[in-house]
Image: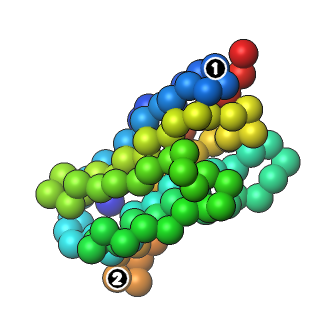
Amino acid sequence: VQLQASGGGLVQPGGSLRLSCAASGSIANIDSMGWYRQAPGKQRELVAVITRGGGTNYADSVKGRFTISRDNAKNTVFLQMNSLKPEDTAVFYCRVTWGSYIYWGRGTQVTVSS
């Protein structure tokens, strides 16, 4: 199983980015799909997670600004990020759980700076 994330980049404060992460390989009926981030010198933290049924959970710091969604047919998870702030700067990782297995993507850099 491989996770391929894309959509990161450099954006000005107040701007938007959309991340996507596609799972490929021998995997189906993925349980939860989520995004985590790790800023320099900080621990990796949960950003948002979505269950197969569409239930969501967000970190307080991104509520109202970020929206997670998924396409079960394509094993893909998305993260729409609006009103980005400099403190959102981090490497964003997607994570997938499938039964007792957990898979991580390699990460995509998001930099919010003027």
- Asked whether, in this view, residue 85 is left or right of residue 35, the answer is right
Q: Residues within 10 Å of mark 2 (few under 14, many from 20)?
A: few
* 86 displayed left or right of 52: right
- How far apart are labels 2 and 1 at the CA level? 39 Å
Q: Quadrant of residue 114?
A: top right
Tell me: residue 10, above or below residue 39.
above
Q: Quadrant of residue 39?
A: top right
**Image quarter of the N terminus:** bottom left
Which residue is denoted by mark 2 in the rendering?
A: 99
Residue furthest to the right in view is: 41
Judging from the image, the colouring scheme is rainbow
Residue at the spot 43% in from the left edge and 35% down from the top edge: 18
In the image, 41 versus 65, the foreground residue is 65
Location of residue 49 in the rendering, given as x and y in whole percent from the top left corner: 47, 64
Residue 97: x %, y % from top left:
40, 72
Q: Which residue is mark 1?
A: 12
Name the side, left or right, on which 57 lies relative to 52. Answer: right
Q: Secondary structure at mark 1?
A: loop
The numbered dot on residue 112 is none
Residue nearer the viewer, 2 or 89: 89
